[in-house]
């Protein structure tokens, strides 16, 4: 190995230098036989890294955490706390993950390179610190799909098989995910910081988060309150985007809520097929806390948890601080509703500001009643505008309510006076045809775990271009077979 060579990466380490106390220096476990399973070449280029070099020995070495002095960085496990399913854990942290360093791309953006599955850390509690190939490839394909849908998300730079088996219900091949994120600051990072003896850590963390993610807050009259408001706004926008595409995150614990407003932690997540607010996929979410329809409510709950460690920064008097925080938090429902309505307005081909705000919700009610496929229904509406009623009739069968809704919708479209074909095309640009449907993801991961990466690569390619209809891909656009519907379960922490 060319240890003398200059590193492929030029890491920076502002988090480590500025926020001592929020991490522990730690080294990755050795990967006995690292082999790349997936490499995100466009993302590598975005970061200013040559994909071919990244696939070479010096790239792979860093992708499994074996950094050397030449790389100019030290790996750390980050500390954070979290409310998990409502119960508070004061010390979670990176149990199986490491921050490698920060990268500044040619676009000037600072982003974290972070590893998941790189071995036990002091935060591991009972865990083995490892990750299996299947769940890591799942994060790769689902986060790439989210990115292609235009939804803020962390991204996967690479998945590297370690050459080591990990013990789950059976022995499974192990892997490390290399994740790129605007940062890994979470609501849980603030919760963790508030418990540390050093009273300067919360304001320093807040200043760091402002500079890195919400710089406009620095110029506000009350910067910390403006920062809080910026996070509330980012999360309101994010959860609305999830709702538009039928995404169920599955584990919205406060340690999985970013300060940047990116989607993070693709564990038990899944896209819903039949529209139903009660949809839950996670095997451990028995009460439906993180059900599709509950996501906005839970986001607001999580944002209330963010206010708690920030209170001393809002005002000297506790009462005044609580009052100020509450006033900001109470803006969440209106912000969320505005994002939601604007998105559905667009999905229905409507232009201008949403006026009749009932069209979207009424359609969703119909879809729920008929268990219509969430993704398919919006594409079916565009087909109506092209003169083909068959798909919408199949999805929303024999019903006066459907025809009444269609008539109202068409009346609004006509009133805005845009050409029908043009409207249909605009709808197709925001309503995906291809999402990582659960049965396709499972099929791809099972094959990959058994050594065949073809179905995974194919699926990845399909969902990376979600809006463009391509012949031969009908099976990727079709809803799950009935037996896959109601009982589908995902498992986290694997
Ligand atoms: P998650 O459900 O992925 O958000 O993880 C919750 C917490 O469990 C985090 O502190 C993780 O680092 C930790 N964790 C999950 N799986 C493992 C594992 N296999 N080994 C050690 N820690 C883990
Ligand atoms: Mg997590």
Image (cartoon, grey):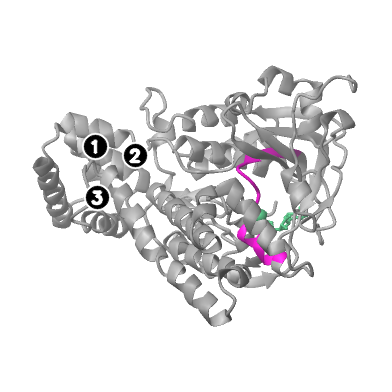
| Position above or below: 90 against 21 | below
| Position above or below: 440 against 122 | above
Give the residue displayed 79% in from the left and 32% down from the top.
Answer: 62
Of mark 1 and mark 2, the one earlier in the sequence is: 1
121 drawn magenta: no
Is the Cβ of the residue at disc 1 closer than 8 Å to that at disc 2?
A: yes
Which element type, helix, strand or loop, lies under badge 2?
loop
Nearer to me, 252 or 45? 45
Q: Quadrant of the N terminus?
A: top right
Residue linked to disc 1: 382
How far apart are the alpha carbons under marks 1 and 2? 9 Å
Q: Position of residue 177 (x, y in %)?
A: 70, 39
In the image, the segment drawn in magenta is: 175-193
Residue linked to disc 2: 431
Give the residue displayed 37% in from the left and 27% down from the top.
Answer: 468
Q: How many marks?
A: 3
> Which quadrant contains ligand 1?
bottom right
Q: Is residue 53 visible?
A: yes
Horizontal side of residue 113 vs 490, given as left or right:
right
- The answer to whether the residue bearing label 1 lies less than 8 angstroms from the nearest atom of ligand 2 is no
Q: Position of residue 155 (x, y in %)?
A: 59, 38
Give the residue displayed 21% in from the left and 54% down from the top.
Answer: 359
| Position above or below: 10 against 53 | below
Of mark 3 and mark 2, the one earlier in the sequence is: 3
Report crowding for label 3: few under 14, some 14 to 19, many 20 or more residues within 10 A (C-alpha): many
Q: Position of residue 439 (x, y in %)?
A: 51, 42
Residue linked to disc 3: 396
Nearer to me, 419 or 233? 233
Q: Is residue 266 visible?
A: no
């Amino acid at each position: 190995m060319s240890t003398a060579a200059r590193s492929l990466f030029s890491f920076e380490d502002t988090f480590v230098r500025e926020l001592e106390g929020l991490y522990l220096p730690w080294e990755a476990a050795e990967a006995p036989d690292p082999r790349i399973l997936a490499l995100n070449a466009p993302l590598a280029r975005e970061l200013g890294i040559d994909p071919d070099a990244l696939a070479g020995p010096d790239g792979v070495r860093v992708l499994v955490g074996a950094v050397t002095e030449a790389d100019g960085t030290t790996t750390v496990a980050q500390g954070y706390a979290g409310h998990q399913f409502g119960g508070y854990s004061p010390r979670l942290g990176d149990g199986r993950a490491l921050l490698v360093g920060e990268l500044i791309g040619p676009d000037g953006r600072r982003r974290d390179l972070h590893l998941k599955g790189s071995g036990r850390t002091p935060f591991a509690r009972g865990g083995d610190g490892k990750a299996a190939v299947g769940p890591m490839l799942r994060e790769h394909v689902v986060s790439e799909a989210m990115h292609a849908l235009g939804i803020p998300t962390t991204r996967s730079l690479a998945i590297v098989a370690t050459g080591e088996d990990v013990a789950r219900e059976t022995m499974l091949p192990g892997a490390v995910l290399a994740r790129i994120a605007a940062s890994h600051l979470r609501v849980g990072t603030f919760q963790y910081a508030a418990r540390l003896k050093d009273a300067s850590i919360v304001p320093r963390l807040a200043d760091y988060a402002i500079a890195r993610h919400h710089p406009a807050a620095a110029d506000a009259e009350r910067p910390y309150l403006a920062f809080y408001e910026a996070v509330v706004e980012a999360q309101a926008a994010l959860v609305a985007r999830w709702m538009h595409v039928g995404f169920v995150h599955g584990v919205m614990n406060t340690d999985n809520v970013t300060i940047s407003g990116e989607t993070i932690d693709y564990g038990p997540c899944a896209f819903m097929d039949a529209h139903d607010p009660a949809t839950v996929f996670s095997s451990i979410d028995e009460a439906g806390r993180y059900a599709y329809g509950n996501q906005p409510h839970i986001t607001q709950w999580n944002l209330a948890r963010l206010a708690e460690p920030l209170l001393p920064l809002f005002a000297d008097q506790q009462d005044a601080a609580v009052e100020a925080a509450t006033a900001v938090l109470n803006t969440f429902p209106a912000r969320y509703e505005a994002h939601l309505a604007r998105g559905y307005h667009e999905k229905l081909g409507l232009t201008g500001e949403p006026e009749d705000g009932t069209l979207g919700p009424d359609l969703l009610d119909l879809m729920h009643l008929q268990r219509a496929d969430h993704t398919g229904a919006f594409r079916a509406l565009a087909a109506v505008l092209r003169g083909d009623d068959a798909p919408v009739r199949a999805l929303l069968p024999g019903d006066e309510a459907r025809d009444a809704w269609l008539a109202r919708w068409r009346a609004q479209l006509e009133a805005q006076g845009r050409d029908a074909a043009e409207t249909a095309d605009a709808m197709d640009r925001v309503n995906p045809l291809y999402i990582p449907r659960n049965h396709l993801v499972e099929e791809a991961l099972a094959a990959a775990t058994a050594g065949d990466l073809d179905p995974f690569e194919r699926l990845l390619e399909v969902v990376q271009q979600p809006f463009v209809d391509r012949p031969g891909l009908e099976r990727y656009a079709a809803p799950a077979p009935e037996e896959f519907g109601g009982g589908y379960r995902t498992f986290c922490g694997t």
